[in-house]
């Protein structure tokens, strides 16, 4: 069994401008590492990121710095509402945060998918994530609603889960 590689993003390249692109299977391990190192995200098994990079590449994006994944957004089209992009996870390597990378990843994905509505869930204790999605709504002049989606007691009882609030942003404006 191999131990997980450390994040290999070279210190010097964190000043580079990331290239935003669709993920490939080869990015799955890097996406998992960025999720792991974010500490905040619920870390899914590496398999989930590999599968996502294969089957949901059209609705996902990575920030590539010299061939290494430095950030990502995973998403899917809601099966009963294909114009709705459901954003599952967003993370940016902490050395690149505060430079608009997450905002650009979201804008890139909205543009590429031509989605008219974006949904995501956020816990109340994540101000960075709330600002990120509020900023998207503001730039698009869209309505931004927040409603309870999953209550803490709907999760399995082994962990102290927090309620997840559904943020819905629409309509997205593709003209700007
Ligand atoms: C949330 C996260 C993806 C933001 O990435 P980022 O590249 O730093 O975000 P941006 O630079 O594009 O900033 C987006 C907005 O959030 C605000 N913001 C960023 N970090 C913030 C913080 N720690 N506290 C409050 N606001 C913050 C920015 O000011 C900006 O607001 P604006 O549009 O009003 O100017 C990043 O902090 C992260 O990876 N966090 C850990 C994982 C996580 O919590 N993911 C979200 C849950 S799925």
Image (tube, rainbow, N blue to C red):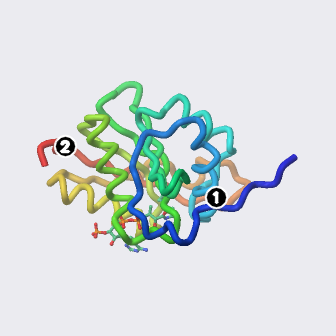
Q: Residue 36 carries which label?
A: 1
Q: Residue 161 at what x, y percent from top left?
A: 61, 58
| 44 vs 17: above or below | above
Q: Residue 34 at what x, y percent from top left?
A: 58, 57
Q: Residue 171 carries which label?
A: 2
Q: Can residue 42 be seen in this view?
A: yes
9 with respect to 124 (left or right): right
Q: Residue 29 at what x, y percent from top left?
A: 64, 46
86 with respect to 42 (left or right): left
Q: Which residue is rendered at x = 60% and y = 50% of the image?
A: 30
Total tally of numbered discs in the picture = 2
Which of the 4 image quadrants contains residue 82?
top left
In-front residue for pair 36/129 = 36
| 86 vs 100: above or below | above
23 with respect to 8 (left or right): left
- Dot 2 surroundings within 10 Å: few (below 14), some, or many (20 or more)? some
Task: Mark 1 and ligand 1: say if the CB distance to the nearest ligand atom is below 8 Å.
Answer: no
Residue extending furthest right? 1
């Amino acid at each position: 069994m191999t131990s997980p590689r450390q994040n290999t993003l070279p210190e010097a390249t964190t000043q580079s401008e990331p290239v935003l692109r669709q993920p490939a299977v080869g990015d799955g391990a890097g996406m998992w590492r960025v999720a792991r190192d974010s500490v905040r995200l619920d870390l899914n098994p590496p398999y989930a990121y590999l599968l996502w990079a294969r089957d949901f590449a059209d609705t996902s994006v990575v920030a590539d710095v010299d061939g290494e994944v430095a950030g990502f957004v995973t998403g899917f089209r809601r099966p009963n509402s294909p114009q709705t992009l459901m954003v599952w996870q967003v993370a940016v390597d902490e050395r690149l945060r505060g430079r608009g990378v997450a905002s650009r990843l979201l804008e890139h994905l909205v543009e590429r998918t031509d989605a008219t509505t974006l949904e995501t869930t956020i816990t109340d204790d994540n101000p960075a994530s709330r600002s990120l999605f509020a900023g998207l709504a503001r730039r698009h002049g869209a309505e931004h609603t927040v409603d309870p989606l999953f209550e803490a007691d709907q999760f399995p009882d082994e962990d102290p889960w927090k309620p997840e609030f559904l943020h819905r942003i629409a309509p997205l404006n593709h003209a700007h």
